Image: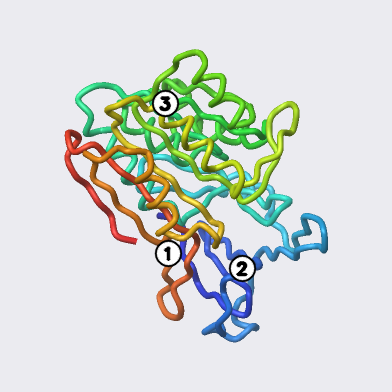
Amino acid sequence: MGHKLLDSGALLRLDDFAGIRVARPCPSATWSPVRQPHEWKPHLRFEPAAGGSGSWSGALDGRAAEAWALRTEAGFELGLWPGPNGQVGAFPEQHANWRWLRATCAASPRPLRVLNLFAYTGGSTLACAAAGNAEVTHIDGSRAALARARDNAARSGLARAPIRWIAEDVTTFVERAARRGESFDGVILDPPAFGRGGAKKREWRIERDLPPLLGSLRILLGSDPAFMLLSAHDPRWPTERLEEHIDALGFHQVDTTSGVMMLSPGSGNPLPMGCFCRFANPRLGTWNDEY
């Protein structure tokens, strides 16, 4: 995969995305970095602003900016760009989950109907689509993120894959889908701690809104789901808490795995980037990837 964590510490991280070094804040990196500050030499550096998004320093020339992309081992690529909130359009800590999603969809004896919520620029959507055995409904409250996701499908050779692209608040969509009697074989969600989405900019708070959302998803998944993947980057949602909420859904005849999404540099401290809990139906076989 075209990403390496080069170093972290002093509340910062240094990543290499396809040869472009990016320095950004990282509140969980409370240790000392391995490299000296003068050794970091990032091409791009993000500086947060109080009460706002922040700004980037450094620049890419036009050709490099157009070609900048993360090529994954799951059969797709994500275009990268310096975003206003310090993100670059991809979460490489999800790489093992992307591989698992592709393998899980490919193992199904029939096409799966998959719902991807808080789908951002489409990593998990494209992992499922790349298996050639999934019809994906991609939901994100940001039209800009949705446009990026569609571009990523095109650059990955998946422009004609069976994907429904919907810019809508996640909770609103799920409530309507439940009323319409829709059903899905698999569900993916990576909720933020806070956000606003959809035409009415409906507020999302993970503490308040995730438990009832999971209850609604239980209805959409029916009695014999193929899989589910829940991940979170909020420290208030560690592995144990994710497991508790997944177990409460009552799908007992499934194989469940959970853990920390970890980025590991060649030397220095591994960087925890959130937690996940996922399950698959045993009829699909078993496949795992270690973080």
- Which label lies toward us, 3 or 1? 3
Please report contact status of discs 3 and 1: CB closer than 8 Å, yes or no.
Answer: no
Q: Please name the residue that numbered disc 3 is placed on.
A: 219
Amino acid type at circle 2 is Cys
127 sits to left or right of 271: left
Determine the image quadrant of residue 187.
top left
Q: Give neighbour class at mark 1: few <14, some 14-19, many 20+ (Cα, 10 Å).
A: some
**How far across and down, in percent of the image, does residue 40 sit?**
60, 77
Q: Earlier in the sequence, mark 2 or mark 3?
A: 2
Q: Secondary structure at mark 2?
A: loop
Amino acid type at circle 1 is Met
Is residue 66 shown above or below 8?
above
**Residue under the image location 68 percent in, 44 percent down:** 195
87 sits to left or right of 273: right
**How far across and down, in percent of the image, does residue 219 sit?**
42, 26
Q: Earlier in the sequence, mark 2 or mark 1?
A: 2
Cα separation, mark 2 vs mark 3, equals: 37 Å
Q: Please name the residue that numbered disc 1 is placed on.
A: 262
Q: Secondary structure at mark 3?
A: helix
Q: Secondary structure at mark 1?
A: strand
- Which label lies toward us, 2 or 3? 3
Q: Please name the residue that numbered disc 2 is placed on.
A: 26
Determine the image quadrant of residue 144.
top right
Q: Nearer the viewer, residue 41 or 148?
A: 148
Amino acid type at circle 3 is Ile
**Residue under the image location 28 percent in, 55 percent down:** 289
Q: How is the image coloured?
A: rainbow
Q: Earlier in the sequence, mark 3 or mark 1?
A: 3
**How far across and down, in percent of the image, does residue 133 sit?**
30, 26
